[in-house]
Image (tube, rainbow, N blue to C red):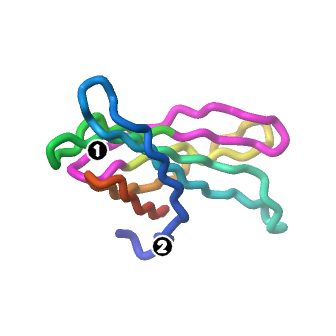
Amino acid sequence: MNSDSAELTVEVQNRGTNDSGKRCWEASAETHEKNVLGFKVATNNFRAQWCALNGELTEQAGSATYRSRLLGWDMVSAETHIQDSTITVVQPLKYDFLNFSTGFNRTVEFTVDTEGNAKAVTY
């Protein structure tokens, strides 16, 4: 974990049991972008989805949405990296002005388990 990391508040929703008998969940966490004056200019919502069957994690995925306070919802594609019980979602960091991308990324790392628990950190 990076020294500049921060733990996020995570909301987990039970998605029930799918047709294959797997128990499924979705976790979400938000980060906020602020301008130089400290005003919130955008919200990034990160999501992780996963299922479990017989003590094994399956069907792991991640996504992210960028919401500009000036432009409304702006879907941004995000990269998802999955390793064991970690779902890492990487999203380009953007600013409101002309949808300008800084070239930097916002990364949220979800750690999930087979009982529907999740933790998230951003760095």
Q: Is residue 11 magenta?
A: no
Residue at horizontal 61 percent and vertical 57 percent from the top: 31
Q: Amino acid at mark 2?
A: Asp
The region drawn magenta spans 64-87
The image shows residue 77, relative to residue 81, as above or below, that is above
Residue at horizontal 30 percent and vertical 55 percent from the top: 115
Question: For numbered disc 2, what is the local secondary structure?
Answer: loop
Residue at horizontal 55 percent and vertical 64 percent from the top: 9
Q: Amino acid at mark 1?
A: Ile
In the image as oriented, which residue stretches furthest toward the bottom? Answer: 3
Q: Which mark is residue 82?
A: 1
Which residue has dot 2 on it? 4
In the picture, measured across the screen, residue 6 lies left or right of residue 41, that is left
120 vs 90, nearest the viewer: 120
62 vs 90, nearest the viewer: 62
Where residue 57 sits: x, y (%)?
22, 44
Where residue 67 sits: x, y (%)?
71, 41
